[in-house]
Amino acid sequence: MRGALGEFVSFLEARGQLTRIRYPVSANLEIAAIVDRVVKGDPQYNRALLFENVAGYSLPLLANLFGSVERMAWALHVDTLEALNHNLGKLLDLRLPANLGAAIGRGAGLAQALKAIGLAPRRVRHAPCQEIVDTQAPTLDTLPILTCWPGDAAPFITLPQVVTRDPQSGVRNVGMYRLQKVDHRTLLVHWQRHKGGAAHKRAALARSETQIPAAIVLGGDPACIWAASAPLPPDIDEYMLAGWLRGRPVEFVACKTQPLEVPAGADIVIEGYVDLTDVRSEGPFGDHTGYYTPVEPFPALHVTAITRRRDAIYPATVVGVPPMEDYWMGKATERLFLPLLQLFLPEVIDFSMPAPGVFHNLVLVRIQKRFPGQARKVIHGLWGLALLSLAKAIVVVDAWVDVQNPAEVAWQALGNVDWARDVIIASGPVDQLDHASAHPAFGGKIGIDATAKWPEEGHTRGWPDVARMSPEVKARIDAIWKDLGIDVAG
């Protein structure tokens, strides 16, 4: 196999992180059942899965590509996910801005910083993703699109890069929106109201335009795949971010039937247009919340061409009851965007979105507290910051608490909080997939100040110290540990 995705398959296989499955299995439920068992099973068997014999299809299917911390890091061209925030921190000037306007300017300036280091996309005339071109009778029936859960309405494309352009500004957006297969030339586009594609829909309707050119990119460089899921500001091209991660610009080629450009190194490209007048019932779908999302109206995409590599690989992900592969995709987002968050909230040392919180339900934040009420300031700040505005629960802890250890945070939240004093209850935007809110995309939110309280915050009794062993005694026990015969590792 050649090409970025094929090369990454070979890379993973050489490191014992890929399993080839040659036994014939079905795209209808069976592959999803295998992936779910692997993701939740023994970590030593948690590998990327290349299904080489999908019943009824000639294309191989790759799943669980990002399903471990190592594979996620390698996909983004780093050795560890922690390197992401260090690398972005070097790119940004993280000195405290003089005011909020300067911070906003610096956040927006990320696009200029990426352009300045030569990562603007490049264009080519001939591309591997167009080795096979079908504009006469393109059909989705050649793709091994998965039906993941018994209650799903249909097969869904689950790991796409959906490319559209703002009808007014021409700025490209790349989003990862599930796509329900209706028939051999029709998909339904599940772009939630908070996402860039939905903004393009609103802009088109405001101009009395009813069709949006679109391209569904599948495969290619894993950094491009992941970048489609990144919650970037509107002025930053997702493929420019992918170019920074890769260390070289993404090459583009013009689509055959739509006025768009797509990554030349993609495996498969579905070209078409979204008809904003053709709105149909989409769903249900077993989503990353672990529940089926309800039936809602979304527009149809009509296919005008399908192009691909000769040796294309069809990529897919399976979402459902956590943890699943998407947890590691979210963890990469968390690590990369920490420096950007710190531009606006410099007291934040670290933050975490644990798997059971399915990203938008729980955010744990560690701060350097310097004044009374600072935890509340951070909570309100996060609720006003991009897609963190959808967070249902935010817990803020002191600098010494490890937010990557949910048990330690729970200890602080349960022991440090007076529930009559330290809780903020608010109403605001929530994720469109939140089934618990009384209204779609709008519901209740909670902020919890789990920091040690100061007298100025109403706690006049004095705050106790944490019971810790003295360093001298710890050093003494370290020195004699092996002689105690308790265990070798200590």
Image (cartoon, rainbow, N blue to C red):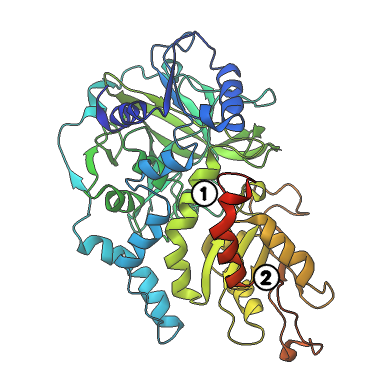
Residue nearer the viewer, 90 or 125: 90
Residue nearer the viewer, 275 or 161: 161
Amino acid beneath label 1? Gly
- Label 2 crowding class (10 Å Cα cut-off): few <14, some 14-19, many 20+? few
Amino acid beneath label 2? Arg
Q: Quadrant of the N terminus?
A: top left
71 relative to 61, above or below: below
Task: Estimate the x, y position of residue 63 in percent, counting from the top left.
Answer: 47, 27
- Label 1 crowding class (10 Å Cα cut-off): few <14, some 14-19, many 20+? many
- Residue lying furthest front: 483
Task: Estimate the x, y position of residue 3 in percent, counting from the top left.
Answer: 25, 29
Residue nearer the viewer, 22 or 154: 22
Whether residue 56 sits left or right of residue 388 in the image: it is left
Q: On the image, numbered disc 2 is attached to which residue?
A: 468
Q: What residue is rendered at 44% in x and 33% in y?
A: 65
Task: Estimate the x, y position of residue 153 in percent, counting from the top left.
Answer: 64, 26
435 relative to 324, above or below: below
Q: Is residue 241 something one can see in this rendering?
A: yes
127 relative to 84, above or below: above
Whether residue 411 sits left or right of residue 472 in the image: it is right
Find the distance from the CA under tag 2 to the CA under tag 1. Answer: 34 Å
Q: Is residue 206 something one can see in this rendering?
A: no
Q: What residue is rendered at 31% in x and 66% in y?
A: 90
Element on which disc 2 rests: loop
Element on which disc 1 rests: helix
Whether residue 225 sits left or right of residue 6 in the image: it is right
Name the N-terminal-most of marks 2 and 1: 1
Q: On the image, numbered disc 1 is attached to which residue?
A: 330
Task: Estimate the x, y position of residue 193 in percent, counting from the top left.
Answer: 57, 52
